[in-house]
Image: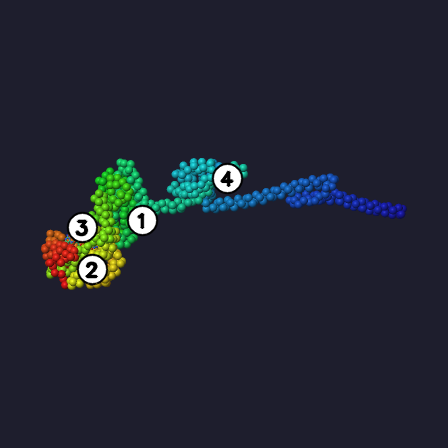
Amino acid sequence: MTALKQFRGRLVLIFIAVAIALAALLHLVSYQFVLKRLNRLSGAVVKLSRGDIQQVSLDNKKDEIGLLNRAFTGMSAEIAQLVTGLNARIAEKEQAERAARKLSKAVSFSSSGILLTDQHLTIEYLNPFLTDLLGCEERNVVEQPLNILLADEMQQLSAEITQTLHERQHWRGDILLQHQKLPARQFWVSLAIAPIRDDIGTLLNYVCAMQDISFIKQSQKQMEHLAYYDILTGLANRSYFRDQLRKAIAMAHRGYYNFALLYFDLDEFKRINDTLGHDAGDELLKEVARRLKSRLREEDTIARLGGDEFAVILSGIKDRHQASVIAGNLQQAFHEPVKLGHHEVAISASIGITVAPEDASEEELLLKHADLAMYEAKARGKNTFHFFSQDLNDAANERLQIENQLREAIREKQFLLYFQPKVDIRTEIITGYETLIRWLRPDNTLVPPAKFIPVAESTGLIVQIGEWIIWEACRFLARQQSRGYDVTLSINLSVRQFNDQDLPSIVERILKRTGIKPRAVIFEITESMLMGDTDAAINQLNQLKRLGVSLSIDDFGTGYSSLSYLKRFPVDELKIDRSFVKDIPQDRNDMDIVAAIIAMAQKMNLRVVAEGVETAQQVEFLRNNGCFEVQGYFYSMPLAEQELNQLTYTVNT
Ligand code: C2E
Ligand code: CA
Ligand code: CA
């Protein structure tokens, strides 16, 4: 029993051991062939479910698990492919989104106006720059047609834009936009419209890009304004005026249309400018422009041609009478003095008028006529108007002829000097002569200096002629001095000659070369030459005085010289103008003036000479008032040198 029992125990033990071994073997086998593979598969499933799409290699055995594995591998490969594709798409999309964000930032921060519309030009989007510019909220204009942004006068362009877009897909141009809140505010933009299409070319949108070019347009306008208007006064300028004149002429050509051309020149403007300064002068011009403009009709043209010259075209006038009524009215503009700072300045203008097509119907001729008429108005005492006439034209032509002949006269030496004695009425002794030029033409006609000196002056020929006069006069004086005569010689200087920088050196050279005593030479200048730039005048006078010559003020009493004014100039002599002497003894007024001039000259220690003395009464009057030196037909006419010995008066020695 015991042994059986032991055997049974052993058997049980063996059985258990075999069972364990079998179980272990079974486990090993099932693990190796089923569980392990299932584990790998489930691992792969877990991995895949976690998003790890790395391929896990599974076996491909022919059993069920192998089949499962194969199916799973196929599926996971497909999933992997899908996920990679998806990821790539997402990355692409993200990149596109980033780019779009960048673009939209750029658009919204852009300092150009950018606007999107649909294919029918209905607004879909505007960038902030444009909403600011237009003064509107995006929502107020979105879904509205593009043309609501355009200024009224641009509306007709919107059809053209649509048309062009239709034909050429693009439109580009400058356009005026309307501010959406302020009706008065409009601004120019340069606009470009381009289409946006999808991949297959269907039109989706239009993009409109615009630059604010108001400032360019404004400077363009300013430039046009500069080209047509006078900056100072805002009136039309010369070139615009010419345009208007041509238009008026063209209308006159068509008949039944007259117009008048008026030329204005302010009297004494230069003097105001010189004494009160250029700013005051500018103010004056502006005021004159304002006043004239206020008196003209809308249809008339007024321009400033330069300096103190203005011109007016009176359009559609009936006749001369109407023109003179309007001119009279315009002249009223000068009645009130102009206030310039602390000064009140009296102003006046000389006006020349010509009527077209009656006087002329060509531009240049009309301008010339108006100019001539204006100069005539000036010559007739200023502050007046004068119509062009044929006589004026003749006179102008004569001046032109003289100008041409003068050049020849200089070449051919057709000038002569005459000499008029100056006599001391106490002793009836000749104390000096005045040199007076004569022009003897080849046909033996004598042209009086009053006819040709102004022409010589205006053409500048006087400088040349004047130098010749000084030479000849000094040679005459040298001959007188060599004969032992102690006489003075008065030489007239014209404006240009006096203003000539070279005058002192010319005189110096002539004095040296002729060897005359300088103190015997007297230069005669007029008061008007001392006006304007007085410092320059004083300087010139001093330079002449330094040469030892004397200076005399000719035609004294006709200018503006006041006593205090006169004191500033280093002059030695006054010549009382003939106009005051001529009516002695009839005109008491003139006699008072002459007496006053003589008294004044004596007080200022100036010599005084009366000119134009023709009668014994005049001599008597002068003597009684203490003026002893006279010149005039009473003693002698101006004579040629060889005629002087016919004179019965003794010459001072
Ligand atoms: P002015 O300098 O006042 O010359 C005096 C003018 O009065 C001269 O005229 C002279 O002939 C004239 N005259 C002299 N005595 C009498 C008189 O008793 N009665 C009248 N009725 N007239 C008298 P003229 O020679 O015709 O010269 C006229 C002006 O031409 C001069 O006026 C002067 O301004 C200018 N002129 C004459 N010669 C010259 C010259 O050599 N150079 C310059 N720059 N100007 C000259
Ligand atoms: Ca003189
Ligand atoms: Ca004189």
Q: Amino acid at mark 2?
A: Arg
Ligand 1 within 8 Å of disc 2? The answer is no
Q: Crowding at label 1, few (<14), some or many (≥20) Cα neighbours within 10 Å?
A: few
Q: Can you give x and y, in whole percent of width and height, for residue 465 in the image?
A: 23, 55
Q: Which residue is mark 3?
A: 444
Q: Crowding at label 4, few (<14), some or many (≥20) Cα neighbours within 10 Å?
A: some
Q: Which residue is mark 1?
A: 232
Q: Are marks 3 and 4 in contact (CB under 8 Å)?
A: no
Q: Amino acid at mark 4?
A: Ile
Q: Nearer the viewer, mark 1 or mark 3?
A: 3
Q: Are marks 1 and 3 in contact (CB under 8 Å)?
A: no
Q: Which residue is mark 2?
A: 475
Secondary structure beneath dot 1 equals loop
Q: Which residue is mark 4?
A: 196
Colouring rule applied to residues: rainbow
Q: Can you give x and y, in whole percent of width and height, for residue 6 in the image?
A: 87, 47
